[in-house]
Amino acid sequence: MPLEQVLIVLVAAVGAGWVDAVVGGGGLLQLPAIMITGMPTLEAMATNKLSSVFGTTSAAIAYARSTKLDRQVAIPGAGLAVLSAGLGAWAAASISAEVLRPAVMVVLLAVAAFVTLRPSLGALPQPHLRTNARVVAAVAAAGVGIAFYDGIIGPGTGTFLIIAFTAILGLDFVSASASAKIINIGTNVGALVVFGVQGHVQWALGLGMAVCNVAGAQLGARMALKRGAAFVRIVLLCVVAALVARLGWQQFSG
């Protein structure tokens, strides 16, 4: 691989780590950067997971030191996420992304509208929303549905997790982001194991990216913790808009 391509991928990994740590969606930067090198899609997805699991774990540690995690949701959700993301990764070779892309775009547009029209969402915790039924719903949504999506496609997973936790459980954006990291570790591990067994991971490049991803993740987590929910909300809306634009371009450009 030419040196300039390696440098582009490493810089993208730093940016992806920052975005993932704040609101998720780092794959928006990292996955296209890998694919520019001409790497096959499954190998690019697998190598992206290798890098991301280190960055996400690093961000989760940074959050855990300063923010209380929702262990009632994060721990069982992460366990389910390993299995669901693994199943998604296994299905990735047989399910066309073109089939799923329009549905994902609709969901993202709904997310953007939901966050825009509800400025109070995620600004402050709303513990009155929390019930046993909602906890079960959040675990199922995060550990099964969103995790399966991460195994098949990936970009935007952290964003979906944060929205699920704020909308269903009434968490503020920072707490939701902290808990989402635990689930995201599970999705990355589950998909990575399957991709690794299938021989799709480019280990040398992925580990180099992981170092850069960790650096970006540490910076992003510290900024989110310092600047609070309002900052996370702005970044979330920017990431959602970028995801919609990227998916739309892919959908209509062929």
Image (cartoon, rainbow, N blue to C red):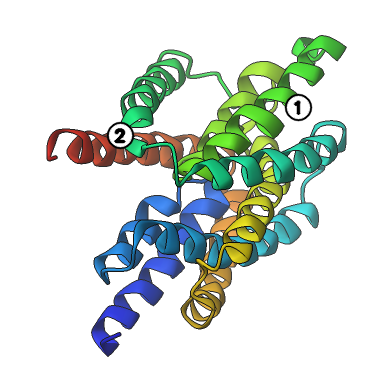
Q: Amino acid under label 1?
A: Val
Is disc 2 in contact with disc 1, using a CB cutoff of under 8 Å? no
Q: In what element is the residue under mark 2?
A: helix
- State whether residue 192 appears in this view: yes
The numbered disc on residue 96 is none
Q: Residue at x 46, y 79 (%)?
A: 205
- Mark 2 or mark 1: name the one nearer the start of the chain: 2
Please name the residue that numbered disc 1 is placed on: 139
**x, y percent for residue 230:** 51, 35
Using residue 171 as the reference point, say whether residue 214 is left or right of it: left
64 over 11 or under it: above or below: above
Please name the residue that numbered disc 2 is placed on: 98
Q: Amino acid under label 2?
A: Glu
**x, y percent for residue 58:** 67, 64
Front one among 81 and 165: 81
Task: Characterize the local packing of mark 2: few (<14), some (14-19) or many (20 or more) Cα atoms within 10 angstroms.
Answer: few
**x, y percent for residue 33:** 31, 64
Using residue 38 as the reference point, say whether residue 157 is left or right of it: right
Front one among 95 and 150: 95
Front one among 80 and 230: 80
Task: Characterize the local packing of mark 1: few (<14), some (14-19) or many (20 or more) Cα atoms within 10 angstroms.
Answer: many
Q: Which residue is drawn at 57% across and 54% down?
A: 21
Q: Quadrant of residue 207?
A: bottom right
Using residue 212 as the reference point, say whether residue 82 is left or right of it: right
